[in-house]
Structures are given as structure tokens and as C-alpha cells.
């Protein structure tokens, strides 16, 4: 059952009689219609009445109205006004630009701007690579979207994508000290997006692609990686994959299984699902079966999109066919990045003993977690109101921190594997309710950044663009333990 959360949070300013039962009556009214009261603050008190701010979590805008009506319907109670706390957070935007240098005197201005700045411009013209140290390029990421796949809401367009991109930028700063900025493009033409990002790139040290629909996102990322000398990272793909892999390693530790003994079902083969499959395959699971809206993917399935041909060739060794239900019997792991309520309790019951279920569709998962927990040993979701939240914020701030610190010119799967190991190893002793660290764990971003940076440095030492899988995982584990020790 869905629980009211802070995404639909209201504060109602209520005038009520100054009676001994007023507080209880108001709380009961909220609870009667399924609201969750989170705060009760007396704003003003008189001999015959009190003014109270009642903060509540709701399920939807309609539910918030029901809560308001329930309060207003009490005898002697009047709702003066209602504030949507989520909209209040977004008034005027969530980020801003501030100067890092003082501009208090004429001398300050002469050095930071004209005439002194001309010397720095000339130095960069002579050595363009110096832009990485003498400008914001050193610590700046562009968060680029076309608004074609905003959260799970679909194609909302560039303007409606802004609040998400602002939030992403705020998270970059909060967790890794990275200066990120929304770049919302009013086009969904692949060629225009690629060219626009290409001409904007000199100002940035990295590109974070966000909320761009598949399959266009695959081509955009691939071609930008070929064209640019800075890392290009599609968070919906690789951020999700990194956190899923880190959590899965811990889940398998909990149930005492090895990756190469596990049959894994991945439901959803869009941006996230494809990246999860790509990172999992080098770890050699016993088998991996991919399922999309048209059923199990296999080479003989007619009408395969080109983006699925590689998946068909690399997965499903047993050449299973059919639907999601046909893929589930005997599976050790289910990873869902698809749509709500696709998985039935009987499907989970048909899995192998000590099964692992990651139902990550958001806000409503592929199966109610309480149903999955009846049969699976470990359950994770993408929601913050259940244990084991798989959240990209565990990955992207630290990944970019490491890339920027190493002045990396590209990002490789080895770096992503190292990042996943670092995330997993922050949890020293995983259990069924704790396989992935909290997003507010201050050791996560430094551990991920260190693992990425060391992987870049190791690759440079060996004169290659990558290191092997084992070395990448070892670097991630080593860095997580070093950060944990320093924190202690």
C-alpha cells in the first residue's frame, strides 16, 4: 500500500476553538481521511480561539484537498489558507550563482576583470588545456536534457524539466562540491542536441545527460563521447546501474550466493535496464534474461529494435521465450526498471530460495514490497519510504568529483565498476534491510570519487584507457575502506 509522503506535503493554517480537545479533534480528522500529520505548531493563542499550522503528508493533490475539507468540516474550525510545501521550495528556483572572489576594491576589479583578466585569456589561447585550471571548467558540469523523459512522467519538454535539473545541480553541490548548471534544450532532434552540447562544451569539465528518452539517449551519448574531450555520462543509464550493482553485491553477500551462480531477470530494457545489463555481464552471472514490454528478448524474436540486438546476442543463454512470468521460475534475482505492478506475488514465490527482488519503478514499484517480502530474502525499491532505497544520488556526485579531480577526458565501464564497489563497501555489515548506504552518508561521495580517480590514474600508468574488471572492483573496495578508516 502506498504511504503518504513529503512529495505531497501541505501546511494548513487553521483557526479552531481554544478547547482541551481541539488538538485531538484536528489530528483525528487528518487521520480519518488517510493523511499523515508531521507537525502541529500553535501560531497564535487567544482566550476563545487558537491559530494552528498543521503540516501533513498526502498521496496526491486530490488527497490533500480531502484533508483540507476534513479539517474545514469540523465544528468551529476554519481553514484560513493552505500552502503546498513542495511548491514553496521551488519558488524562484533552487540554485544560484555566487562569486568565489571578493570584488570590494578597484584593485580587486582590475585583477578579476579588466585589465588583468586579459593576461589569463591570452594564456589560455596559447595553451587551451589551461582552461581546466584557470576557469570554472575545472569544477563545472552541464546537466543537459531535452525534457523527453522527465522522471516517470514522460515527454514534458524543456521548461517542465527545469525543476528536476535544478534539483540535480543542487545535489551535485551538496554532496560533492561540484558546480553544476541546468542546460534545458528546446529541441528533441538528435542532431541538434549533439551539436548544441558540442558547442557549449568548452565551458564545462563534464556533461551529465538527464531525462532523455531511449533510444535517442544511446546515440546522443555515444556520439558525444566520440566528439568531446570531457566525460559524458547519462545518469539515467549509468548512475542507476552503478547503484544497482553496488546494492546487488551486498544483497548476494546477505543471502550467501555468488554472482556466477545466479540467474538474473532484468525487466525493462530502456536506458537504465540496458546499462545494468552492460555492467552485470562482465561479472559473469550464470545467466541473464532481459524482458521488455513485448516479452523475453532473444535473437529469434521478430522486429527487434537495433538497440536490443546486442542485448539479445549477449543474454538468455537458455534461449527462453515468453513473458515476464515465464522468465521468473527459479530466478535468483529480479531487477525491475520498468512499470508499476507488473510482478505478481506468485512470480516471486516461484523464484529460487533466498531470492533478491529490486522493484525500482518509481513512484510505484513493479510489486508491492510488502508482498515481495513474503517470499524474497532481500527487497529493494526506488522509494525513500522503504528500506534499501536505490538512489542515483549515491553515484553521480562522487563519480563526477573523481572525474574532475583526475581531469579525466572520458569515462569507462571500469570507472563505473569501481564506483559500484565503493558504494557497496561503504556498508561494512549488510543485512536484509540495509544493503545500500543512506544518501546522507558523508563517506559515500569521497569513496566513489577516490575509486574513480584511482581507476583513471591506474589506466594512465598502464598507458591504456582501462583496467581489468577485477582491478576496478578492488580499487573501489580499497577506496571505500580507506575513507571509512579516515572517517573513524
Image: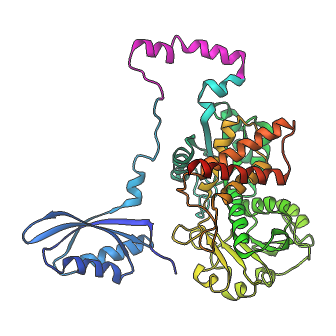
- Most extreme residue toward the left is 47
In this rendering, position of residue 104 left or right of residue 139: left
Q: 300 or 457, which lies in front?
A: 457
Res. 342 visible in picture: yes
Q: 144 or 373, which lies in front?
A: 373
Please name the colour scheme applied to the rendered image.
Answer: rainbow
| Residue 438 percent across, percent down from the top left | 56, 61
Taking 89 as reference, is 410 above or below it? above
Q: Residue at x 64, y 55 (%)?
A: 148
Q: Quadrant of residue 105?
A: top left
* Magenta-highlighted residues: 100-128
In this rendering, position of residue 178 left or right of residue 312: left
In this rendering, position of residue 196 left or right of residue 437: right
Q: Residue at x 88, y 61 (%)?
A: 310
Q: Quadrant of residue 261?
A: bottom right
| Residue 163 percent across, percent down from the top left | 50, 52
| Residue 69 percent across, percent down from the top left | 30, 76
Taking 484 as reference, is 6 above or below it? below
Q: Residue at x 19, y 75 (%)?
A: 77
Taking 415 as reference, is 19 above or below it? below
Predominant SS of the magenta segment: helix
Taking 95 as reference, is 241 above or below it? below
Residue 51 colored in magenta in the image = no
Q: Quadrant of residue 458?
A: top right
Task: Please count the marks in the image.
Answer: 0
Residue 105 colored in magenta in the image = yes
| Residue 411 percent across, percent down from the top left | 76, 44
In this rendering, position of residue 309 left or right of residue 84: right
Amino acid at each position: 500500500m502506498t504511504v503518504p509522503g513529503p512529495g505531497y506535503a501541505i501546511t494548513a493554517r487553521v483557526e479552531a476553538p481554544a478547547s482541551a480537545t481541539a488538538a485531538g479533534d484536528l489530528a483525528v480528522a487528518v487521520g480519518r481521511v488517510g493523511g499523515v500529520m508531521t507537525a502541529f505548531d500553535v501560531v497564535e493563542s487567544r482566550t476563545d480561539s487558537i491559530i494552528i499550522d498543521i503540516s501533513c503528508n498526502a498521496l496526491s493533490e486530490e488527497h490533500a484537498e480531502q484533508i483540507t475539507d476534513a479539517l474545514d468540516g469540523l465544528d468551529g474550525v476554519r481553514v484560513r489558507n493552505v500552502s503546498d510545501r513542495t511548491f514553496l521550495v521551488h519558488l524562484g528556483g533552487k540554485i544560484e550563482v555566487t562569486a568565489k572572489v571578493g570584488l570590494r576594491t578597484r584593485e580587486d576589479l582590475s585583477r578579476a576583470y579588466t585589465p588583468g583578466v586579459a593576461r589569463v585569456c591570452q594564456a589560455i589561447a596559447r595553451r587551451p588545456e589551461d582552461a581546466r585550471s584557470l576557469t570554472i571548467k575545472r569544477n563545472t558540469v552541464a546537466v543537459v536534457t531535452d525534457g523527453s523523459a522527465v522522471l516517470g512522467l514522460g515527454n514534458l519538454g524543456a521548461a517542465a524539466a527545469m525543476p528536476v535539473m535544478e534539483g540535480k545541480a543542487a545535489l551535485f553541490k551538496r554532496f560533492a562540491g561540484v558546480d553544476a548548471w541546468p542546460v534545458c534544450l528546446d529541441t528533441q532532434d538528435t542532431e541538434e542536441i549533439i551539436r548544441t552540447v558540442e558547442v557549449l562544451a568548452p565551458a564545462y569539465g563534464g556533461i551529465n545527460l538527464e531525462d532523455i528518452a531511449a533510444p535517442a539517449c544511446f546515440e546522443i551519448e555515444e556520439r558525444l563521447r566520440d566528439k568531446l574531450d570531457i566525460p559524458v555520462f547519462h545518469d539515467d543509464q549509468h548512475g542507476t546501474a552503478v547503484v544497482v550493482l553496488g546494492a546487488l553485491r551486498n544483497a548476494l553477500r546477505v543471502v550467501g550466493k555468488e554472482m556466477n551462480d545466479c540467474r538474473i531477470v532484468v525487466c525493462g530494457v530502456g536506458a537504465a535496464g540496458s546499462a545494468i545489463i552492460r555492467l552485470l555481464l562482465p561479472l559473469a552471472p550464470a545467466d541473464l534474461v532481459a524482458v521488455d514490454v513485448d516479452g523475453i528478448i532473444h535473437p529469434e524474436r521478430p522486429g527487434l529494435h537495433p538497440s536490443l540486438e546486442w542485448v539479445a546476442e549477449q543474454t538468455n543463454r537458455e534461449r527462453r521465450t515468453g513473458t515476464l512470468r515465464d522468465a521468473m521460475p527459479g530466478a535468483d534475482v529480479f531487477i525491475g526498471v520498468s512499470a508499476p505492478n507488473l510482478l505478481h506475488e506468485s512470480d516471486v514465490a516461484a523464484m529460487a530460495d533466498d531470492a533478491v527482488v529490486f522493484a525500482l519503478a518509481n513512484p510505484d514499484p513493479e510489486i508491492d514490497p510488502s508482498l515481495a517480502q513474503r517470499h524474497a530474502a532481500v527487497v529493494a525499491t526506488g522509494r525513500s519510504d522503504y528500506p534499501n532505497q536505490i538512489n542515483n544520488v549515491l553515484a553521480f556526485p562522487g563519480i563526477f568529483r573523481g572525474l574532475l579531480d583526475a581531469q579525466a577526458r572520458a569515462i569507462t565501464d571500469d570507472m563505473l565498476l569501481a564506483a559500484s564497489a565503493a558504494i557497496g563497501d561503504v556498508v561494512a555489515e549488510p543485512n536484509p534491510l540495509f544493503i545500500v548506504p543512506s544518501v546522507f552518508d558523508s563517506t559515500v561521495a569521497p569513496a566513489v570519487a577516490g575509486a574513480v580517480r584511482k581507476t583513471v590514474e591506474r589506466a594512465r600508468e598502464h598507458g591504456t584507457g582501462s583496467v581489468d574488471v577485477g582491478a576496478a572492483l578492488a580499487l573501489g573496495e580499497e577506496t571505500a575502506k580507506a575513507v571509512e578508516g579516515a572517517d573513524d
